[in-house]
Image (cartoon, rainbow, N blue to C red):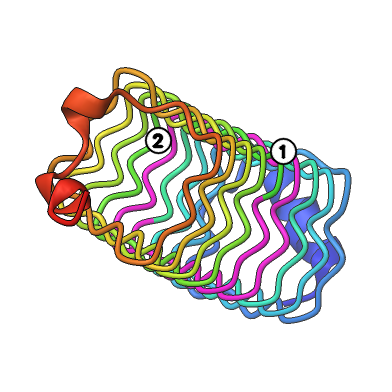
Amino acid sequence: MNTNKLIERYLAGNRDFIEASLQRANLSEITLNGINLSRANLTSANLEGISLRGANLNEAILDKVTLWRSDLSKSFLILCCLSKACLIRANLNGVDLHKANLNKADLRLASLRYADISNTNLVGADLRYADLTGANLANSNLAGANLTGAILSQADLYNVNLSKAVLARVDMSNTSLTSVNLNEAELYNAKISESKLPSSLFEFA
């Protein structure tokens, strides 16, 4: 789909662009709040600074997309593909990302406060200094992810895989880790309550 045509139709009141083909499209610095781009293909698109508040991106393909400084707050990205996507400083507060694929995505300094990231693939993702306060990460895979300096206070980490993850200086205050896989995780200077750590960490103490 031609991007100018999409913008023209959006400004005319159309919000439905289901299965739109927008690979490598340039939609930077524009407002498309509430748009329906479910099952759309936006592979390698430039969405830098875009506003997609409350948008429907369920099952959309956003692999290698640029969403730096974008606003996707309260949007829906269920089963969305965001492999190797750039989400640096993105506003993802309150988004629904459950069952999404964020393999090796760059989420440095992103805000994911109270987001639903359950059952999500975050293997090798870069979450340095991201804010995940109150986020639901239950059953997600963060093996090998880098969470240096991230905030995970009050997050739901039930059955989360953090094996080989970097958790240096991470804030996990008021967060239970009793069912978390921390095998070979790096916990240097992490802020954690011992009473909420998995018992396996003390087996060889």
Foreground residue among 14 and 204: 204
Verify whether residue 184 appears in magenta.
no
Foreground residue among 66 and 51: 66
- Contact between marks 2 and 1 (CB within 8 A): the answer is no
Q: Main secondary structure of the magenta part?
A: loop
Q: Tell me the CA gap for discs 2 and 1.
A: 17 Å
Foreground residue among 115 and 196: 196
Any mark on residue 51, and which? 1
The magenta stretch is 78-107
Relative to 145, is 69 on the left or the right?
right
Q: Which residue is pictured at 56% across the width and 31% down the height?
A: 131
The answer to whether 24 is drawn above or below residue 66 in the figure is: below
The mark total stands at 2
Q: Residue type at mark 1: give it.
A: Ser
Is residue 12 something one can see in this rendering? no
Image coordinates of residue 152 in percent, x first then y, are 43, 31
Structural crowding at the residue carrying mark 1, measured as other residues with C-alpha within 10 Å and reported as few (<14), some (14–19) or many (≥20): many
Relative to 78, is 194 on the left or the right?
left
Q: Which residue is pictured at 32% across the width and 22% down the height?
A: 154
Is residue 92 something one can see in this rendering? yes
Foreground residue among 142 and 79: 142
Q: Give the mark nearer the N terminus: 2 vs 1.
A: 1
Secondary structure under the numbered disc 1 in the rendered image: loop
Image coordinates of residue 166 in percent, x first then y, are 54, 56
Structural crowding at the residue carrying mark 2, measured as other residues with C-alpha within 10 Å and reported as few (<14), some (14–19) or many (≥20): many
The answer to whether 133 is drawn above or below residue 33 in the figure is: above
The residue where tag 2 is placed is 115
Image coordinates of residue 139 in percent, x first then y, are 20, 56
The answer to whether 53 is drawn above or below residue 66 in the figure is: above
Verify whether residue 101 appears in magenta.
yes
Quarter of the figure with residue 183? bottom left
